[in-house]
Image (cartoon, rainbow, N blue to C red):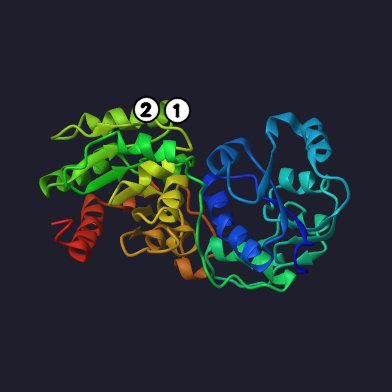
Amino acid sequence: MAPTSSSLCLLRLSALGDVTHVVPLVSTLQQADPGVSLHWIIDKAGHKLLDGLPGVTFHSYDKKTGLAGMRALRDSLPAGRFDALLQMQVAFRANVLSAFVPAKRRIGYDKARSKDLHGLFINERIPDRPGIHVLDAIGSFCEPLGLKQTEVSWDLAVPPAAVEWANAQWTDDGRPVLMISPCSSHVRRNWYADRYAAVANHATSRGWRVVLCGGRSELERGMADAIQAQLATPALDLVGKDTLKQLPALLARAALVMTPDSGPMHIANAMGTKVLGLHAASNPHRSGPYSDRRYCVDRYDDAARKFLGKPASELKWGAKVEFDDVMQLITVEDGIAAFERYVADYAPRGA
């Protein structure tokens, strides 16, 4: 990459966890070439989360706008051709959208990760490295440019007002906080209200504060109400009360976040908060919290054997086991054991 002369376009629309994984790549590109011009085609939710990321011009695309929206997005891009397009999404809609981005080099996924005609829209591929985390696969997009992502760091552009809001939600009285973000956008990844409540009651008995967080959907509101109804001590209920800009600051106030494979899992990890991840439908080694998976529950192999009739080692990397009742494999005892692993590591704060 020639200093101060590179012009790159990143295309990654969703979801929140995945766009969070792109942020370290942005840092890698900017450190290698401080003058790089970075444009990022992203969805509306991702834009709300990351707006203000230094040195990045965002172009928001709403999938509901179809081809008309794609043409409008093309008109919003700078004149001329980008030196390279990093096409980091293989879904068919994203592949078609990439055709509206003029670029000399069109870098996409290796053949093993390609689908939905991805190969027709690119002219270069990242290295084929099976068995790596999603974040590392995204980080590989700098390699055709002659770079290597050797450090992983995040800057989610959290404004001071968001931190002030989060700090105002409860008074810090010395008790560690277990924050429960109970819902993923994939319903079959979600655990059960009675089991969340059982772990929360255990945490309360250990002197912890419990806080509920989540979005504004009926599913999330209903889950929070069901959890709250089974708690011995009411939790602080912040479900639906934060914005996407406030969410990272809120997650940063927790000692431990309990959640299924979800956007908040990866945002919490990016903010330096430990995660009690609940994995049966997905492989935590591929899509769990990147920095630290010591406090995750891993029933992925059990799920593969029960629902697919083979061990996880024989599945295609990245295969999901999203069946009804797959999360039944994660017991209350699993959740409490993961919580206690954190307590043991961080005593006396978690004692």
**Drawn side of residue 136 relative to residue 344, left or right:** right
**Drawn side of residue 99 relative to residue 329, left or right:** right
Q: Quadrant of residue 343?
A: bottom left
Q: Quick one: quadrant of the C terminus?
A: bottom left
Residue 230 position (above or below residue 319): above
Q: Quick one: quadrant of the N terminus?
A: bottom right
Residue 324 visible in the picture? no
Measured as percent of width and height from the top left, residue 303 is found at 40, 57
Measured as percent of width and height from the top left, residue 123 is found at 83, 63
Q: Nearer the viewer, residue 258 or 172?
A: 172
Residue 233 position (above or below residue 296): above
Residue 221 — which label? Answer: 2
The three-letter amino acid code for the residue at tag 2 is Arg
Residue 28 visible in the picture? yes
Instruction: Classify mark 2: residues with Cα within 10 Å, few (<14), some (14-19) or many (20+).
Output: some
Q: What element carries label 1?
A: loop
**Drawn side of residue 275 relative to residue 148, left or right:** left
Measured as percent of width and height from the top left, residue 171 is found at 22, 37
The three-letter amino acid code for the residue at tag 1 is Ser
Circle 1 sits on which residue? 217
Residue sitting at 39 percent across and 43 percent down? 249
- The answer to whether mark 1 and mark 2 are in CB contact below 8 A is yes
Residue sitting at 38 percent across and 64 percent down? 292
